[in-house]
Amino acid sequence: MESQPPEPAGKRKTRPVIKTQPNNQTAALGSDLTFTVVPDGSGFLGYTWLQSGVLVHGGTNRTLVLTNVAAAQSGSYSVRVSNVFGATVSSNAILNLLPVALCSNVIIAADPETCAANATIDAGSYDPEGSRSH
């Protein structure tokens, strides 16, 4: 029987292990954010990001960048990290979105001699169902 050379140190022939799970995020609507996972595993590692169990278009790296986030993107995110030996799914990271007030009647008046400005904003009130009241 032929002897096999020893495996290089740190190279395990197992499915990936997630060393650092993605973190929960809180962001304002329209902002940008990044989820990151730190895996450990041998060979090529593949990444599949999921939002509430549904594939995220373009989510194929160890980081998932979301730009100009919308309300539909809130929820739980996880990532499936795989290699030829198997796959591991991360814990869920929750994306919480902060409400944004709908503002109307913004008035800014500047004194033409001093350039001092006064501003008033009628923001109405926030309704989590999405309707606006005054």
Image (cartoon, grey):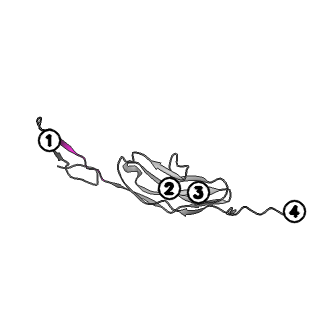
Query: What secondary structure is found at the residue carrying circle 4?
Result: loop
Q: Nearer the viewer, residue 116 or 68?
A: 116
Instruction: Name the residue furthest top.
Output: 112
The tag on residue 36 is 2
What residue does disc 3 label? 81
Looking at the rendering, the stretch of residues picked out in magenta corresponds to 99-107
Question: Quick check: 31 left or right of 113?
Answer: right
Q: Residue at x 45, y 52 (%)?
A: 34
What residue does disc 4 label? 2
Dot placed on the residue nearer the N-terminal end, 2 or 3: 2
10 Å neighbourhood of mark 2: few (<14), some, or many (≥20)?
Answer: some
Query: What secondary structure is found at the residue carrying circle 2?
Result: strand
Dot placed on the residue nearer the N-terminal end, 3 or 1: 3
Q: Residue at x 68, y 59 (%)?
A: 85
Instruction: Name the residue furthest right.
Output: 1
Identify whether 13 is placed above or below 117: below
Inter-mark Cα distance, 3 to 1 = 57 Å
